[in-house]
């Protein structure tokens, strides 16, 4: 199984995204505070300027005040500082402000004019400004306003600086995050590749540990320690089982020989049938022990060294030729359907043993008159072999258990056997790195051998059999 994490689902990528978001948020807050403090400071400066100028003009002689106001307007042709003198009826008397702003309160306090000061000769026509207005003893109203475009421009500069700062930080950050993510991703792939043999049963493999000593190396070390203990325990259990099977074979063989001799001596007496049953039971025990030792032998990964290119079509023809007479004796049509197959690297004798075991089970559990169909074809990744029969099948809740040693399902408890046949098949399949799938066919059981290691979701249901075959099988099932 190969795991491909999404680009931005790694811990490094998420950490970079989190830090980038925090930086952007902190930059916004920082620039907001700077702009607020700058605006507040400059507003105070502007207010002081217009209040001082208002104080100067208010102290001017009333007779010379209109001329002074006009002169103040003339020395500011760009309208940065606006001055206006209005009569009691609101008409302009002097200055460069042509209309008294409606929102301006005449109380001597500086304030922002959101609507701005109307200045017809400027391109925008209205100028945002801070203004102050007082009423003179002559009931005239004196207004002084200062343009805040400088302050607004400063705010724009600050926000542009923030935008450039964030962009110049995030873009290299994303690039650096991509480069930083590649290292851990490569190490994860290396760990994944190292776990594939372990998952297939080779407990001698260990996860790679680098010199960095980081979290991945710590985790790999913990897993390796766990694998050491698992391997030790498995070897102890395997050694005990193998020793028991090996040590008991000799006394059981001697016992069988003695029972056989005794049976020959009393062949004509009634006790002969009892001895015959005892010999049969001893033969069953010996068969179980041989199967146990066979499974242990197949679990030795060193056997892979003798693998070679195997023609599966030839192996399947041999299996069909071997079991066709057995199926014929039981009245079971046994068909073989072969498509061109590519060679696989395997042990031909073991492949014959596994397929013969599966076909033998299909013949044994299929009722007399049922059908067995052996089929092989190419998948996208390699050959696939299907063994289909019209028997009772294997319940879904038992399909994982039937490959365990000595397990016998409800449908097979009354059938002779040791419960080790599928264990041997499973050991052969694991030794080759193939995949065994137990499912339901069109009319009974289906066992599929994928002569490759498929990815999750790639196990496809075999194509349906021809309709006449299905109907015939259902009629005889």
Image (cartoon, rainbow, N blue to C red):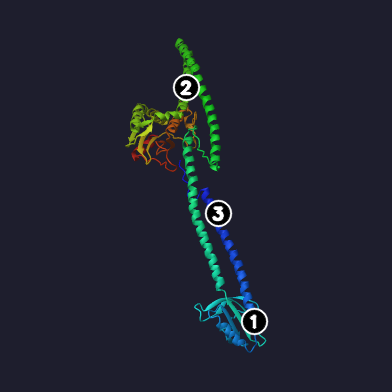
Residue bearing the label numbered 2: 284
Disc 1/disc 3 C-alpha distance (Å): 55 Å
Disc 2/disc 1 C-alpha distance (Å): 123 Å
Query: Quick one: quadrant of the C terminus?
Result: top left
Residue bearing the label numbered 1: 56
Disc 3/disc 2 C-alpha distance (Å): 69 Å
Residue bearing the label numbered 3: 19
Position of residue 51 measured from the top left corner of the image (x, y, whole percent): 64, 78
Position of residue 324 measured from the top left corner of the image (x, y, whole percent): 35, 28
In the image, residue 163 sits, relative to residue 356, either above or below, namely below
Instruction: Name the N-terminal-most of marks 3 and 2.
Output: 3
* Viewer-side label of 2, 1: 1
Instruction: Name the N-terminal-most of marks 2 and 1.
Output: 1
- Neighbourhood count class around disc 2 (C-alpha, 10 Å): few under 14, some 14–19, many 20 upward: some
> Foreground residue, 158 or 458?
158
Element marked by disc 1: helix
In the image, residue 24 sits, relative to residue 89, either above or below, namely above
> Foreground residue, 388 or 427?
427
How many numbered marks are there? 3
Find residue 322 and report its image quarter: top left
Position of residue 441 measured from the top left corner of the image (x, y, whole percent): 41, 38
Instruction: Name the N-terminal-most of marks 1 and 3.
Output: 3
Position of residue 22 measured from the top left corner of the image (x, y, whole percent): 56, 56
- Neighbourhood count class around disc 3 (C-alpha, 10 Å): few under 14, some 14–19, many 20 upward: some
Q: Is residue 312 visible?
A: yes
Who's the residue at 60% across and 69% down the image?
39
Element marked by disc 3: helix
- Neighbourhood count class around disc 1 (C-alpha, 10 Å): few under 14, some 14–19, many 20 upward: few
> Foreground residue, 393 or 73?
73
Q: Is residue 284 left or right of residue 311?
A: right
């Amino acid at each position: 199984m190969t795991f491909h994490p999404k680009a931005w689902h790694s811990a490094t990528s998420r950490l970079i995204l989190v830090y980038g978001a925090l930086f952007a948020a902190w930059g916004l807050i920082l620039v907001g505070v700077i702009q607020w403090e700058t605006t507040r400071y400059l507003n105070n400066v502007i207010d002081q300027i217009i209040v001082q100028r208002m104080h100067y003009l208010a102290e001017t002689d009333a007779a010379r005040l209109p001329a002074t106001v006009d002169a103040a307007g003339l020395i500011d042709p760009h309208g940065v500082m606006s001055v206006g003198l209005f009569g009691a009826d609101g008409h302009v008397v002097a200055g460069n402000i042509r209309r008294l702003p409606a929102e301006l309160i005449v109380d001597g306090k500086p304030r922002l004019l959101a609507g701005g000061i109307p200045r017809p000769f400027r391109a925008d026509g209205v100028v945002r400004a801070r203004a102050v207005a007082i009423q003179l003893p002559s009931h005239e109203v004196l207004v002084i306003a200062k343009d805040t475009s400088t302050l607004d421009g400063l705010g724009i500069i600050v926000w542009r600086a923030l935008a450039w700062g964030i962009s110049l930080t995030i873009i290299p950050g994303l690039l650096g995050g991509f480069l930083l993510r590649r290292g851990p991703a490569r190490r994860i792939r290396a760990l994944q590749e190292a776990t594939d043999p372990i998952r297939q049963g080779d407990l001698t493999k260990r996860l790679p540990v680098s010199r960095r000593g980081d979290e991945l190396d710590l985790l790999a070390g913990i897993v390796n320690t766990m694998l050491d203990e698992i391997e030790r325990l498995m070897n102890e259990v395997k050694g005990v089982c193998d020793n028991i099977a090996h040590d008991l074979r000799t006394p059981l063989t001697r016992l069988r020989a003695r029972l056989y001799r005794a049976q020959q001596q009393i062949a004509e007496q009634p006790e002969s049938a009892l001895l015959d049953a005892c010999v049969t039971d001893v033969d069953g025990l010996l068969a179980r022990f041989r199967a146990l030792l066979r499974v242990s032998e197949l679990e030795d990964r060193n056997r892979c060294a003798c693998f070679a290119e195997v023609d599966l079509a030839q192996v399947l023809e041999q299996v069909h030729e071997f079991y066709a007479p057995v199926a014929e004796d039981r009245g079971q049509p046994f068909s073989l359907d072969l498509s061109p197959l590519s060679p696989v690297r395997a042990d031909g004798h073991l492949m014959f043993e596994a397929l013969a075991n599966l076909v033998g089970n299909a013949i044994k559990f299929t009722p007399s008159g049922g059908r067995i169909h052996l089929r092989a074809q190419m998948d996208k990744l390699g050959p696939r072999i299907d063994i289909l029969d019209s028997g009772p099948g294997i319940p879904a809740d038992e399909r994982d258990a039937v490959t365990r040693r000595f397990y016998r399902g409800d449908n097979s408890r009354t059938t002779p056997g040791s419960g080790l046949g599928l264990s041997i098949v499973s050991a052969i399949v694991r030794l080759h790195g193939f995949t065994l799938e137990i499912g339901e066919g069109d009319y009974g059981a289906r066992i599929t051998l994928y002569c490759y290691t498929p990815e999750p979701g790639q196990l496809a249901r075999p194509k349906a059999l021809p309709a006449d075959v299905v109907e015939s099988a259902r009629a005889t099932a």
